[in-house]
Amino acid sequence: MATAHSVGDKYVAAVIDGAGGLPVLIPALGRALPVDTLIDRLDGVFLTGSPSNLDPALYGGPPRPPGDPADCDRDATTLPLIRACLEQGVPLLAVCRGMQEMNVALGGTLFGRLHEVAGRRDHRSDKTLSYEGRYGPRHAVRLRPGGKLQAILGEVEEIEVNSLHGQGIDRLAPRLEVEATAPDGTIEAVSVPSAKTFALAVQWHPEWRVAEIAQHRLLFAAFGAACRQRLNARAAHERPRDMA
């Protein structure tokens, strides 16, 4: 069976319309991806959601359940890429699977089946609904007072988000800080306080209707601003000095 490298149109549109950037797909090449060379050419990295789940072996989890969708090449691509972004000061925005990858890349663990954890709600999407219905608001999340995400979203205390994930953060990685939680205690957003630049992840899908939903637009605009700052810094560094 042939393998394809692809990205959903909603992610492409969010980078263009929300962040004001030009999206370029990074193929899931795993160890064949020259991360150290690539990272110097990037203005920012956006980690998308995916139908697949991280390999539980990467965080000491139980064996993968039968039928659980996997993408080990993506695992082997994104985890080193996340660490390189943080090391080199490349702006990083992650959503859904991307947030889970950030947590695992930095030493955290996941709930493989969040809906089976006592006290947690079912955060998976309702497949009986239309595509638009599945991306509609599902529950509230409370933002950390004084946090990075709250500052981006206009100092609001709570927002409504969509919910289309089966996994979630269990043990938070040491370098991460919680930025938002759901009423059932599920971690819904995290940041990297020690990061040199923008480094934020959310469990929901802010790429959905980014031009119409204010909180989505604000998040991508902040990411885009950080990417342009890096672009300008790189351009200044690479500009030849005037001859005396």
Image (spheres, helix red, strand yellow):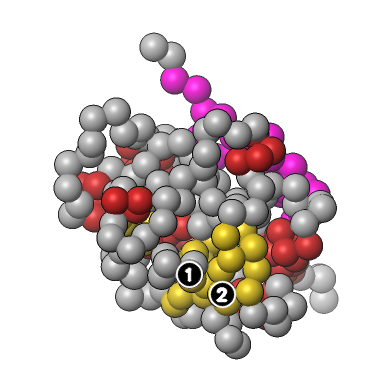
Magenta stretch prevailing secondary structure: loop
Q: In which quadrant of the rendered image does the C terminus lie? A: bottom right
Front in this rendered view, residue 120 or 13:
120
Circle 1 or circle 2, nearest the eye: 1
Number of numbered tags placed on the structure image: 2
Residue at the spot of label 2: 142
Instruction: Magenta stretch: give its range.
Output: 3-27
Q: Secondary structure at mark 1?
A: loop
Sequence-earlier tag: 1 or 2: 2
Q: Residue at x 81, y 52 (%)?
A: 211
Which part of the image, by quadrant, shows the N terminus? top left
Q: Is residue 19 magenta?
A: yes
Q: Secondary structure at mark 2?
A: strand
Looking at the picture, does residue 148 appear above or below residue 121?
A: below
Marks 1 and 2 sit apart, C-alpha to C-alpha, by 8 Å
Q: Residue 199, percent across and down? A: 54, 68
Q: Which mark is residue 183?
A: 1
The image shows residue 150 at horizontal and vertical percentages of 64, 78
Query: Is 174 part of what is drawn in magenta?
Result: no
Residue type at mark 1 is Pro
